Each structure stands twice: as C-alpha cells, then as structure tokens.
C-alpha cells in the first residue's frame, strides 16, 4: 500500500474545484481502504480522491463517476500521471450512472447535483456488508440530508465531524493565517441487517 | 502497509492526554512513512501515534520517548494490544533521551517540556536528508518557536496549517456540534545542504 | 445606551448552559437594538442575553421566556444584580408562552425544545415590519430548519454565519488554545410584504 | 450611543483590506467604549473601526493613524458618509505618529508594519489607568509578540481569543459554507501600578 498524502499541486487541475489535501487525507482514512477493495467515487471532479483510493486499493478497482466532460478528461490525465490503471472514469450522473457497477467496499459521495436522497438510496444498496460510505458536505443541505437519511436506517452506523483547516503562509517575515472552507465528513458503516 | 485510522477508544488510556484521531491521521499522512522507516516520537504520551507509525513502517523501528512512567506503561500496553513489536518505549526527557538513537526518516515532536529549541536543534541533526519532521503545537509558544527556528534553517522546507475538528454527536433527535481544541501541525522536510 | 459585553463570570449561573460572551455580543449586534425596542428572548436560560438586551433597549421591555423553573430563578437574580427592571421573566414553553406578548422589534430564538417550526411561524407574525429575528443554532437540525423555513418566506431577508471561538488560556509559560463549541447565528429581517 | 454593527458593504472601500463586521463587533465590544472616551486606532485602514468607535464615543475623539495615503482618503470619505466629525485622520507610522496625541481610554492596534514591540511600549504609556487596548492579530508573529510583551507587564491584565467566522451563502437551493480568515483578538486592561 502507498502512503497517503499527494500534494494538491501534483494533480493536473482545470476549473473544477478540488478537495483539498487535508480533507482528502481524512476522507481516505475514514474509508479504511484495504488492498483489493472495490471503490466508487461519486462526483469525482479532478480524480484526486479516486487516485489516492486506487493507490490504497492497489489490486482493486475504482469507479470514478463525474458528470462533466472536463472532469473526465482530468481524471484520465491524472490517472495516467500517477499510473493508477485501476481508475475507471465514467461520464454520467448518479444514481443512473451507477448501473452495472459491482457492489463496493467503499463509496465516496462528494457531489450529488441535487439528487442526494436518490443517490443515498442507491449506494446504500450497492455497499457491501461491512463497507464504508464517506460523504463530504460543503453545504448545510447535504450535511442535514445525509445525517437524517442515514441515521434513519437501522443497519448503518453513522459518525460525523466538521473540519476547518487554516493554512499558514509565510509572507516576508510573517506567518499569515488563511482559512480554507470548512467541510463536514459523514462516515457510514453498513452492518448486518 | 496497514490503513491509517485506529479509533480513539481502541487505545488503552490513562490520565495522559491523547492526540485525537483526526489529528493523528493528518500528522501521519504528513510524515509520509514508508516501509522500513526509522521513526522517533518525542512526547509519545499513550503511544497512539507511535503505534500507528509502527504499523505504517512495518519492518522499521519506532522510538517512543516519554518522560512520564504512566505514559511508558500505556505505550507498552498499547503496543502489546496492537502487536507492534517494533515500538521501543524510552523513559526520559528530550533532548537527553535521544542519545544513542539512530538517524531517523521521520521525527514527531508532540511534547517538549519547555525545551523546544534544544529539541529542534537535536532532531534537526538526527533527521536524515529527505526526512520529515512533524511538530504538533497546542500552544502559541510552540507554534511560533517552531516556525521561527525551522524557517531560519536554509536546508529545511517548512509547511504549516491549523486544524479545528468539530465532532457531531447525536443527542435524541438532534446532531450537536462539539469542538475539539485546535492544533497546529508544522511539517519540515530536510533537503540537501 | 450601555456598552455591550458583560463578562460570563459576572452572571449568576446554575446548571443551565449559558451562551458565551463572544456569541452574545455577536447576537446582540446583529439584533441592532435601539432605545425603546420591545424584545422577546425565547429560551432565555440564565437571562444573560435578555439582560444585555434590556441594557441596550433601556426604556423598552424584554420578555424572557424560559421553560425551566431554575432558569426563571436565575433570570430574576441576574436582572436584580444588573438592575434591569425591564426584564420580564415568563415561565412556559414557546409558542404557547407567546400569548399576550406585544409585537416586537427584536426576537431572539435560542431554544426551541423541538418546536422550532411552530415557534418560527409564531414569531414571524409577532415581529414588526423592519424588526430583526436572531436565531442561534447549536445543532444541525436547528440550523437547517431555520434556514429552510425562513428563506422560503418572501418578506424576510436571511443572513447567516457560523462562529468558532478559541479561548487562549495562560498556563505557566504557555498560552493554550481551548475551543468553545461552534454556533451558527441566523439573522432575519422582516421587510414590507 | 449608537448600536454597533455597520454592514461591511456600507463602507466605501478601496484596495485596502478591511476588518470584517463580525471581528469589528467583537473588537469594539471588548473595548467597552463609553461616551466621551478618547480613542486611538493604529493601522486604521478604511476607517471602519474608527467610525464605529466614534459613534460609540459620541462626544469623544478618535485618532485614526494610517500610513497609506489611500487609507487616509477612505477614512475621510467614510467619516463624511457616517457623519462622524470626531474622527481625526493622521497620516503616518506608529509609534512616531503618536506624538502629540493625548492619553487614551481605548487603543486599537490593528497594524504594526513590523514595529509591534515599539508600538506596544508607546501605547502602554499612552493608555490611561483603567483603559483598554485591543490588538487584532492576523499573523502568528503579532499574536505571540503581543502576548509575550503584554503578559510580562505586571500592571496589565491580558485576555485573548481567536475567532473563525464562516459565512453562509445561498447559492440556488443550497447554503454554502465560506470561511473568513481567522483572527486573534488580545484585550489588555491597564490597572494600577
């Protein structure tokens, strides 16, 4: 398994927003990826999370779902750069784009395009028993919807936290504080029914 | 390599404060541990960081320096629980306790007992070229001292950020926000002179 | 008008949680209280916000609604201590306890006991045109419910922010960082229909 | 006395960074301004803090020191807009620009141009017994220097906290979280020697 923690600037980026390194690390750690895991990344963006996940999974497969063509191109480029042949980019919108994807050990939900309830229903079924779902929320609506839907399902265990990172930037003789936007991370584990 | 992210409650804890999981994950990711790495953990406390590091390093050795006897006992118990035979507890205060320890790939500085400048001098010398030092600061003094000392050394690259975690706790029908104390993490990489 | 900013330890406190000073200041400033304003404080707790509001309103009246008898006793004691005779403690639960209270310039909603939607309906009607409602949320449910209900009402302007305060505490030679729990503050202004 | 809390967008702004409303409110509340207070604002920028202070002080005088000509022009324009004739703009650098200014009840230190130790010495002398100094820090160096210098002076009481504000911005059907940079606020009260 490779160590976590590719630097943000190592990824090829376009105009698509990218999850920042500190958040990517926490989401990946919460996913507890093991060698051979099948992984789905919904709203894969530039592919930064998919590629880190692919490097953890090694012999497993990562399905990177992204609805923007520009995103798919970035995922292809970044997967080539980091030689993660096990990243499979899929152009489309969830939940429809999930058709035909095998059951997964780990599912990341990073973008929902307003269809979060349907996506959560679909991925709840796709997740293997013992599997982990990691939802990242940058809006109050995603956070509250994810909590209320997943906490209502008895077979899932839900844990959540918010994280606020402040980068320190040296400017001449001073170290300035620069806030990144806060993100909430909801981790859901599927137990026996 | 094992996945990161042992839960806080899995560790045996006494009255010694323990770095929280989210911070441990970020510190470990910043350390970019590889199989076989030699690691020093100064102010090892309950050993939570040492044990996670030992599981990453696998064939490498971790030197866990702790000045409280209670801490050493917890490190021994936790190392046994997690079967990390490569954790070596050392009772003593840094920098004196560093005598005889080999040069390291990764050095964590989590506690300094008021001797941060001397400790930073000692570990700067002990760190291998290309090695990473990860300093966690819970006081303004540790943060500002670590930045000013390490940024003044030309052969070291310094990066720093603060992280504030808010745990979400379900209480009957509500999800309450509970702040953990903020921590600053300073990562230093040793380059060629 | 009196300056804002009574220290937390100046209030008589029991076992009832008290809004911290920094949050009280921000809530009061967002309320833009003017001399003579009629003010309602729902979930008044120890009365700390009511008393600060009463000192701003001066010739106006503050109706402090609290459902715990212990809270009412603390409000009475604190109002006596700060000589704010214009604080009127009302034992009861909102929205029922709002019966008979006049239309208000400022309404604080700090506790809802699970009846937030009904309370917001009631206070939306009680608020004068041009009046300000300030809702403090310590749970995700209060935050998301308050936003979705109030943003759906066309005659109200809604503004919201979260605040995370970190107290700095001197311990021997060090300044330690101690987080207070984050709070979200939603400010609603009632416009012309 | 006027209520606190002018909105950011009400001030005329140029390219000079402006303290955000939430921070301005907290700094002003910590200053406990009373009618008639003499106030000094070092690093006045656009004058936003000076103008709020002038509206609190009413019959008192505010000395707004700013080293950039562009800042002075903004202070003049904003003082005219808010009709605060008691704001006195002074072009120059502290501590030199403090020559001839009377002893003050309240001193804000918002910018130091690298001369913080000299400025703190000068304003410590200029502050009346019982007066309050409010230092806002956006760098680690300002924070640690202000704490170490002021905590070493026996006749001053020092209190400090950090504040991180997250604005909530409605974007179509979602409420997005947008972090403002964290700021530390150090409040110093001068006691009897």
Image: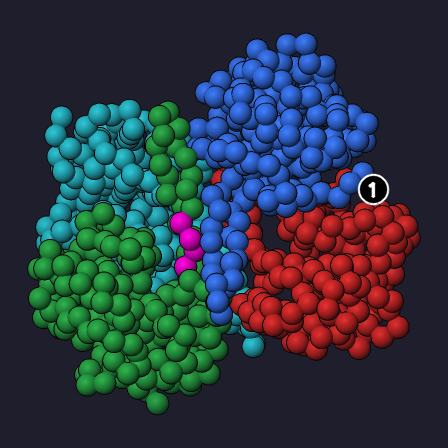
Chain colours: A green, B cyan, C red, D blue
Looking at the image, residue C52 sits to the left or right of residue B180; the answer is: right
The residue shown at (34%, 64%) is B7
Between residue B116 and residue B186, name the one nearer to us.
Answer: B186
Q: Is residue A182 magenta?
A: yes
Q: Main secondary structure of the magenta part?
A: loop
Q: Residue at x 19, y 49 (%)?
A: A10
Residue at 16% across, 65% down: A54
A181 in magenta: yes
Crowding at mark 1 (Cα within 10 Å: few <14, some 14-19, many 20+): some
Answer above or below: position of B187 versus C72.
above
Q: Nearer the viewer, residue B91 or B95?
A: B95
Question: Is C150 or D186 nearer to us in this picture?
Answer: C150
Which residue reaches farthest bottom? A193
- Chain letter of mark 1 equals C
Residue A135: where, in percent of width, then height? 36, 69
Name the residue tied to disc 1: C1
Q: What range of the chain is rendered magenta?
A: A180-184
Q: Which percent across, then down, holds residue D132?
A: 68, 28
Image vertical order of residue B88 relative to residue D134, above or below: below
A180 left or right of D127?
left
Residue B125: percent from left, percent from top: 18, 29
Residue A129 located left or right of residue C46: left
Whether residue A28 can be seen here: yes
């Amino acid at each position: 398994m490779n160590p976590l923690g590719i630097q943000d600037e190592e990824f090829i980026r376009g105009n698509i927003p990218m999850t920042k390194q500190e958040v990517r690390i926490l989401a990946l750690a919460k996913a507890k990826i093991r060698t051979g895991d099948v992984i789905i990344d919904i709203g894969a963006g530039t592919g930064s999370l998919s590629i880190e996940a692919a490097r953890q999974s090694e012999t497993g497969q990562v399905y990177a779902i992204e609805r923007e063509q520009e995103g798919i191109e970035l995922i292809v480029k970044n997967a080539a750069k980091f030689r993660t042949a096990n990243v499979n980019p899929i152009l489309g919108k969830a939940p429809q784009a999930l058709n035909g994807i095998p059951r997964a050990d780990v599912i990341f939900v990073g973008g929902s395009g307003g269809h979060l309830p349907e996506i959560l229903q679909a991925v709840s079924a796709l997740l293997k028993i013992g599997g982990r779902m990691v939802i990242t929320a940058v809006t109050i609506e995603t956070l509250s919807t994810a909590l209320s839907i997943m906490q209502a399902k008895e077979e899932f265990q839900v844990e959540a936290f918010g994280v606020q990172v402040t980068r320190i930037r040296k400017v001449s003789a001073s170290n300035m504080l620069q806030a990144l936007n806060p993100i909430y991370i909801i981790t859901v584990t599927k137990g026996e029914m």
